[in-house]
Amino acid sequence: MKRIYLAIPYTGMTESSYRQANKATLKILNKGMNVFSPISHCHSLTTAENEEDRLPETWEFWEKIDYQFIDWADEIYVLIPEEGIEKVRQSTGVQAEIAYATKMNKEITYVLMEDL
Protein backbone atom coordinates (compact mmCIF):
# COMPACT_ATOMS: atom_id res chain seq x y z
CA MET A 1 0.00 0.00 0.00
CA LYS A 2 1.45 3.34 -1.07
CA ARG A 3 2.10 5.75 1.84
CA ILE A 4 1.34 9.45 1.32
CA TYR A 5 2.32 12.41 3.49
CA LEU A 6 -0.20 15.22 2.95
CA ALA A 7 1.16 18.75 3.35
CA ILE A 8 -1.10 21.82 3.40
CA PRO A 9 -0.62 25.32 4.87
CA TYR A 10 -2.11 25.73 8.33
CA THR A 11 -1.23 29.09 9.92
CA GLY A 12 -3.79 31.78 9.23
CA MET A 13 -6.32 29.30 7.82
CA THR A 14 -6.59 26.62 10.50
CA GLU A 15 -10.26 25.68 10.14
CA SER A 16 -10.19 25.81 6.34
CA SER A 17 -6.99 23.77 6.30
CA TYR A 18 -8.54 21.19 8.63
CA ARG A 19 -11.64 20.88 6.44
CA GLN A 20 -9.63 20.60 3.21
CA ALA A 21 -7.09 18.17 4.69
CA ASN A 22 -9.88 15.89 5.92
CA LYS A 23 -11.55 15.89 2.51
CA ALA A 24 -8.24 15.12 0.76
CA THR A 25 -7.39 12.41 3.30
CA LEU A 26 -10.74 10.74 2.66
CA LYS A 27 -10.17 10.82 -1.10
CA ILE A 28 -6.65 9.37 -0.78
CA LEU A 29 -7.81 6.58 1.54
CA ASN A 30 -10.67 5.77 -0.84
CA LYS A 31 -8.08 5.28 -3.61
CA GLY A 32 -6.50 2.50 -1.55
CA MET A 33 -3.46 4.44 -0.33
CA ASN A 34 -2.40 5.05 3.25
CA VAL A 35 -2.03 8.69 4.28
CA PHE A 36 -0.67 10.70 7.16
CA SER A 37 -2.16 14.17 7.29
CA PRO A 38 -0.66 16.18 10.17
CA ILE A 39 -3.64 18.54 10.07
CA SER A 40 -6.29 15.80 10.04
CA HIS A 41 -4.54 13.74 12.66
CA CYS A 42 -3.41 16.53 15.02
CA HIS A 43 -5.69 19.58 14.64
CA SER A 44 -7.80 18.61 17.64
CA LEU A 45 -4.65 18.48 19.78
CA THR A 46 -3.97 22.17 19.10
CA THR A 47 -7.55 23.39 19.53
CA ALA A 48 -8.64 21.73 22.78
CA GLU A 49 -10.99 23.83 24.89
CA ASN A 50 -8.65 23.91 27.90
CA GLU A 51 -5.29 25.51 27.26
CA GLU A 52 -3.45 22.93 29.39
CA ASP A 53 -4.81 20.21 27.06
CA ARG A 54 -3.47 21.90 23.91
CA LEU A 55 -0.27 21.32 22.01
CA PRO A 56 1.46 24.28 20.33
CA GLU A 57 0.64 25.16 16.72
CA THR A 58 4.22 26.25 15.99
CA TRP A 59 6.39 24.74 13.30
CA GLU A 60 9.19 24.45 15.84
CA PHE A 61 7.09 21.99 17.85
CA TRP A 62 5.83 19.90 14.90
CA GLU A 63 8.96 19.90 12.72
CA LYS A 64 10.65 16.76 14.08
CA ILE A 65 7.35 14.89 14.22
CA ASP A 66 6.45 15.77 10.63
CA TYR A 67 9.91 14.82 9.37
CA GLN A 68 9.51 11.32 10.84
CA PHE A 69 6.28 10.88 8.89
CA ILE A 70 7.93 12.19 5.72
CA ASP A 71 10.60 9.52 6.25
CA TRP A 72 7.76 6.95 6.49
CA ALA A 73 6.04 8.14 3.31
CA ASP A 74 6.65 6.94 -0.22
CA GLU A 75 5.45 10.23 -1.67
CA ILE A 76 4.57 13.74 -0.53
CA TYR A 77 1.38 15.38 -1.74
CA VAL A 78 1.30 19.15 -1.38
CA LEU A 79 -2.34 20.15 -1.44
CA ILE A 80 -2.86 23.54 -3.04
CA PRO A 81 -5.64 24.96 -0.89
CA GLU A 82 -8.68 26.80 -2.19
CA GLU A 83 -6.99 29.95 -0.87
CA GLY A 84 -4.36 29.56 -3.60
CA ILE A 85 -0.76 28.57 -4.32
CA GLU A 86 0.51 31.72 -2.56
CA LYS A 87 -0.42 30.10 0.77
CA VAL A 88 1.89 27.19 -0.10
CA ARG A 89 4.71 29.56 -1.04
CA GLN A 90 4.27 31.57 2.19
CA SER A 91 3.98 28.59 4.53
CA THR A 92 7.09 28.08 6.65
CA GLY A 93 6.03 24.52 7.46
CA VAL A 94 5.15 23.41 3.94
CA GLN A 95 8.31 24.95 2.50
CA ALA A 96 10.39 23.15 5.15
CA GLU A 97 8.55 19.88 4.44
CA ILE A 98 9.26 20.26 0.72
CA ALA A 99 12.94 21.00 1.38
CA TYR A 100 13.26 18.01 3.72
CA ALA A 101 11.42 15.68 1.33
CA THR A 102 13.70 16.83 -1.50
CA LYS A 103 16.77 16.17 0.66
CA MET A 104 15.42 12.68 1.41
CA ASN A 105 14.77 12.02 -2.32
CA LYS A 106 11.01 11.72 -1.88
CA GLU A 107 8.69 12.20 -4.81
CA ILE A 108 6.69 15.42 -4.40
CA THR A 109 3.38 15.96 -6.17
CA TYR A 110 1.40 19.20 -6.07
CA VAL A 111 -2.32 18.42 -6.11
CA LEU A 112 -5.61 20.24 -6.32
CA MET A 113 -8.63 18.81 -4.56
CA GLU A 114 -10.25 17.96 -7.88
CA ASP A 115 -7.16 15.95 -8.90
CA LEU A 116 -7.57 13.53 -6.00
Image: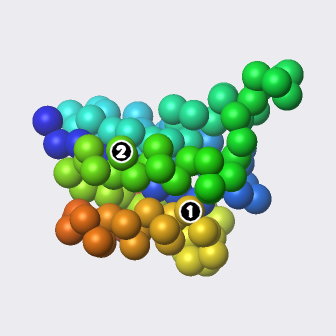
> Where in the figure is residue 75, as x and y percent of width and height?
25, 55
Front position in the image: 102 or 37:
102
> Where in the figure is residue 105, as x and y percent of width and height?
20, 68
* Secondary structure state at the residue bearing disc 2: helix
The residue under the point 36% across, 46% down is 68
Residue furthest right as drawn: 50
Q: Which residue is mark 2?
A: 69
Q: Amino acid at mark 1?
A: Gly
Residue 112 visible within the image = no
| Res. 54 mark | none
> Where in the figure is residue 110, as x and y percent of width and height?
37, 67
Instruction: Classify 35 as above or below 80.
Output: above
* Quadrant assignment for the N terminus: top left
Q: CA distance from mark 2 to mark 1?
A: 14 Å
Query: In the picture provided, is 94 more to the left or to the right than 101?
Result: right
The residue under the point 68% across, 52% down is 58
Front position in the image: 14 or 28:
14
Q: Residues within 10 Å of mark 2 (few under 14, many from 20)?
A: some
Quadrant hosting residue 49: top right
Query: In the picture provided, is 42 more to the left or to the right than 16?
Result: left
* Secondary structure state at the residue bearing disc 1: helix
Query: In the picture provided, is 44 more to the left or to the right than 78?
Result: right
Front position in the image: 51 or 3:
51
Q: Amino acid at mark 2?
A: Phe
Instruction: Classify 115 as above or below 40.
Output: below
Which badge, 2 or 1, comes first in the chain's sequence? 2
Query: In the picture provided, is 45 more to the left or to the right than 109?
Result: right
Q: Which residue is mark 1?
A: 93
